[in-house]
Image (cartoon, helix red, strand yellow):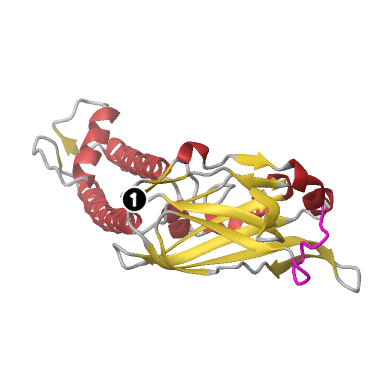
Amino acid sequence: MPRATGKYGLGEVGPVSTKALLPRRSDLYYYLQTASWPMLLLIIAVVFFAVNALFALGYYFDGGIENVHTGSYADMFFFSVQTMATIGYGKMEPYTLTSNILVSIQALVGLLALAMMTGLVFTKFSRPTARVRFSRNAVVSVRNGVQSMMFRMANLRGNRIVEAEIHVLLAWDDKTLEGERVRAFRDLETTRRRSAFFALTWTAVHPIDAASPLLGAEMDALAMRNAEIVVSIVGLDETLSQTVHARHSYRAEDIAWGARFADVLTIFPDGSREIDFTHFDEVEMLEQQQAAAAG
């Protein structure tokens, strides 16, 4: 399946420790916004039944609900659901002061919960997202006579991303002059950083020249330094006129040295174009370039 939010899921780039997830989970609104739809619906369902079960305990111990079976917790639970959802069938009703107070509190809780859940679901549903597919691997081979690192992207939507811009970053382990281990970041310049409109595919090319931090790098050396190439793309959704973005990352083992991408673009006689996604992730090894690319 296409992945647009990052290779490691939910927008993270690279491995993330449990401690790194704690700040994200402590922000409940952010967590609910970024959770998947099945997880969000599961959380809403669990909270709904848990709150009703709690109020049902109050009704059960008070015993102030008319027309219920004696000692029936199930009746109290369903009365709680009817109160929370403002259904009001009219068969069961509170008659003690305590039960009426509980009903008043639950009515207020239900009103607030409905408002919050409506806003949360609407915001999540209406939030624009980019469906950008990144190639499974990046490749290193000669492009226009220059050794280059390349990866490609495809816009999976039928519309265009206008004023699209990519940013490529190399992250790896490094040491300061004082011997402190740090995570260093270097920009990787590409031959084309902006596109007036991103409709089909886009192959980003980073020339490995004298200014490139990848000059002379080898796969083993990059792996030892825990190197990671982080790619982000930002643009304006043509249909919604809102900013969308996508992110992906490539580790050292994801780079195919001395290879090129298989052709996926078909041009018809009338000038129309079509992408064959069945070969989108395929690479072709170039034996004559492999030794030079790896060195």
- What is the secondary structure assignment of the residue under circle 1? loop
| Relative horizontal placement of residue 204, taking residue 58 as reference (left or right) | right
Q: Residue at x 45, y 49 (%)?
A: 35
Residue 109 position (above or below residue 2): below
Residue 37 position (above or below residue 173): above
Identify the residue at the far right of this view.
178
Q: Quadrant of residue 184?
A: bottom right
Residue 42: x, y in percent?
A: 39, 40
**Main secondary structure along the magenta-highlighted residues:** loop
Residue 262 appearing in the image? yes
How many numbered callouts? Answer: 1
Residue 5 appearing in the image? no
| Residue bearing the label numbered 1 | 272
Q: Residue at x 22, y 26 (%)?
A: 70
Nearer to me, 205 or 60: 205
Query: Does 126 appear in magenta?
Result: no
Residue 270: x, y in percent?
A: 31, 50
Q: Quadrant of residue 217?
A: bottom right
Identify the residue at the far left of this view.
90
| Relative horizontal placement of residue 77, taking residue 17 as reference (left or right) | left
Residue 186: x, y in percent?
A: 71, 69
Query: Does 212 appear in magenta?
Result: yes
Q: Residue at x 55, y 47 (%)?
A: 9
| Residue type (three-letter) at the residue carrying disc 1 | Ser
Disc 1 crowd, CA 10 A, few/some/many (<14, 14-19, 20+): few
| Relative horizontal placement of residue 20, taking residue 97 as reference (left or right) | right
Nearer to me, 45 or 228: 228
Looking at the rendering, the stretch of residues picked out in magenta corresponds to: 209-218
Residue 238: x, y in percent?
A: 32, 64
